[in-house]
Image: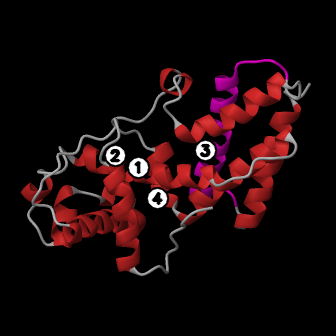
Amino acid sequence: MGEIWHSDTGEANVSQKFSRLIQAAMYTPYTFVVYSVYMTATTTQKIAGAARRLLDQEGVEGVTMRRVATAVGITPMALYRHYRNRDGLLNALADAGFLELTAKLAGLRLTGVIDRQLLKILDVFLDHAFDNPRLFELMFLQKREGARQYPDDFKTRRSPTANVSADVIARAMETGHLRKDDVWEIVFETGALMQGLVMLYLGGRLAVSPSEFRAFCHRSFGRYLNGIHT
């Protein structure tokens, strides 16, 4: 399901992977980044790697322009040639995370019964949360400038990660497997269920192993889906 970063991955390798993603994220509608011809590939990798390491180690609060600049060995003003402000840097990190997650979802083979298809999608999100907990929090749980909002950004299909579930649910309604209802409300509700459970798990409120937590999420989704089956 695509590249997954683990805590034991070498820093140089992480920097190169995240650099490629963050360069793509620099040009999303939700990230304002000023590109400079003076930014070399090596410096780009250092900035991406430094910001990601701070995020992984300390969460959003640990990612500041000054600390990233210090880690890279440049002045804070040099960063402002490429990111308007800290929000721009955080959005670049989040957007790179969404690109990674979207790539994993695109690699799914969604066949079989509807419940199984939706649980496959759920597992990709859970894998992402397990492997990148601080990044997941930034992507889905932190208030940030430019984050997609319900309903407009979802109903206009600006969320590539939500579109996958929406298409499966819409097909299930068309074929009579699920009752006719508002597709996007169901997508948002199931997303809220998943994100709420993950938030509690990452916050240490569930004293269970990762495999036990995954099974609990599957049962929770099963109960929800049973309520909208035909």
In the rendered image, which residue does mark 2 sit on? 91
Image x and y of residue 102, in percent: 54, 49
Structural distance between the alpha carbons of marks 3 and 2:
19 Å
In the rendered image, which residue does mark 1 sit on? 94
Structural distance between the alpha carbons of marks 2 and 4:
14 Å
What's under tag 2, amino acid-wise? Answer: Asn
**Residue beneath the point at 41% across and 36% down:** 147
**Residue beneath the point at 19% across and 48% down:** 83
Task: Pick whichever of labels 3 and 2 is earlier in the sequence.
Answer: 2
In the rendered image, which residue does mark 3 sit on? 195
Q: Secondary structure at mark 1?
A: helix
What's under tag 1, amino acid-wise? Answer: Ala
* Rendered view: 214 above or below 178: below
Q: Are marks 3 and 2 in contact (CB under 8 Å)?
A: no
User: Chief secondary structure of the magenta span?
Assistant: helix
Residue 8 located left or right of residue 221: left
Task: Pick whichever of labels 3 and 1 is earlier in the sequence.
Answer: 1
In this orientation, which residue lies closer to the viewer: 207 or 18?
A: 18
In the rendered image, which residue does mark 4 sit on? 134
